[in-house]
Image (spheres, rainbow, N blue to C red):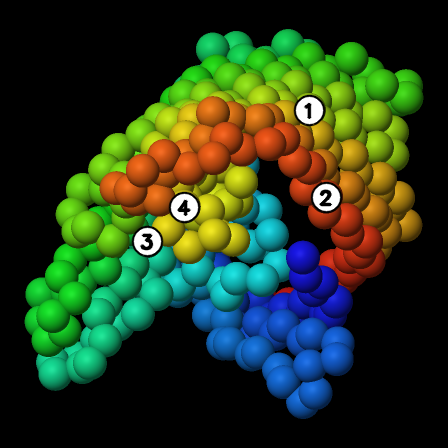
Amino acid sequence: GYTLPGIWLQPKFTYQPLKNIKFELGAHGLFYWGAGETAHVRPFIRAQIELFKNFNLVMGSIYGAANHQYNNALYNSELNLTADPQMGIQLLYDSERFSADGWVDWNNFIFRGDDEQEVFYAGVSTKGWVTDKDSDFQMNIPLQVVFRHQGGEIDSVAAGIQTWLNAGAGINASYQISKTRFLRKISAEVMAFYFNQCAGEVLPVERGYGINAWAAAQMKWMQVKAGYWGGKDFVSIMGSPFFSCVSVCDPGFVYSKPSMLYGHIEFTKKFGKICSVGAEVDAYYHLSSKGGYIYSSAPAEPQKSACSIAFGVYIRLNPSFLIKKFK
């Protein structure tokens, strides 16, 4: 258990000399209450150009985190608040029937002779639309990939190369009931996932799989979501540890075919166009299993069912105003 009280701040200037070119310069800051004088600040620099119709190139601080629209099994929503902005290069494509987001996030750059390894993440998130995007009933086929590499061409550390892969595919459907009534929208998704430790022997499993299914209802001020997860030897690279078979509490323990039911409730109240206040609750009910093992050791005791709870409250401000318009 832990608590993360604080402020997430990202002021920036935007300059758009042409319709298809945009530059952004600012800073990203994370400040925890009760952490003394500790402040985590990083520069924010982004260049974006529309090379062709519907096709954009982004360099610097890419559109990361929730913008990738990954399933919960591949991206932990908590990283939206705690992680640094992803820095690298990104290609974005969006048309009536297909959207794609390909990106590289460079975590650690090395020079010759460094005593560290280079680390980068890469991924692809696509959606192929079966129906029209503006129709009340929508259906799309998501394909999602996350890739992590640690090593380097000029690696001077004898730690070896580590390469991990997550991939998922499935189907997503939603129905817009109303824009004015209490119940606005319902949606559901089913996806299958795959994990592979392509290089290295850091993790105790080589490959695994998982299934994630959820349904959600969007109301006037509230969103409700319920889902199921089940898998075997699956490790999520950027997702919540609840979707991984490797324990973060008991070092060396691997769960045998972990599964869980989970739910999410969020209340949001908007004040104008720049402010919203909300609260959310997440519950994860880990189903009992036949046990696990401690890497290659003898089987461990059966695992009893357990429940994990997360709660959050927030105020979100997003003001924007024109400083000067050039002729």
* Residue 61 relative to residue 37: left or right: left
Q: In this view, does 298 lie above or below 178?
A: below
Query: Residue placed at 87% from the left, 29% from the top?
Result: 220
The quarter of the image holding the N terminus is: bottom right
Q: Nearer the viewer, mark 2 or mark 4?
A: 4
Q: Going from the N terminus, do you reach mark 2 or mark 3 first?
A: 3
The residue tagged 3 is 121
**SS type, badge 1:** strand
Residue 213 at x, y percent in the picture: 55, 20
Q: Which of the labelled discs sits on residue 226, or is there none?
A: 1
Q: In this view, does 210 lie to the left or right of 82?
A: left
Mark nearer the viewer, 2 or 1? 2
Q: Nearer the viewer, mark 1 or mark 4?
A: 4
**Which residue lies under the disc numbered 4?**
253
Q: How crowded is mark 4: few (under 14 residues within 10 Å), some or many (20 or more)?
A: some
Q: How far apart are marks 3 and 1 (CA)?
A: 29 Å
- Where on the picture, by quarter, is residue 110? bottom left
Mark in the foreground, 2 or 3 = 2
Checking the image for residue 309, the label placed there is 2
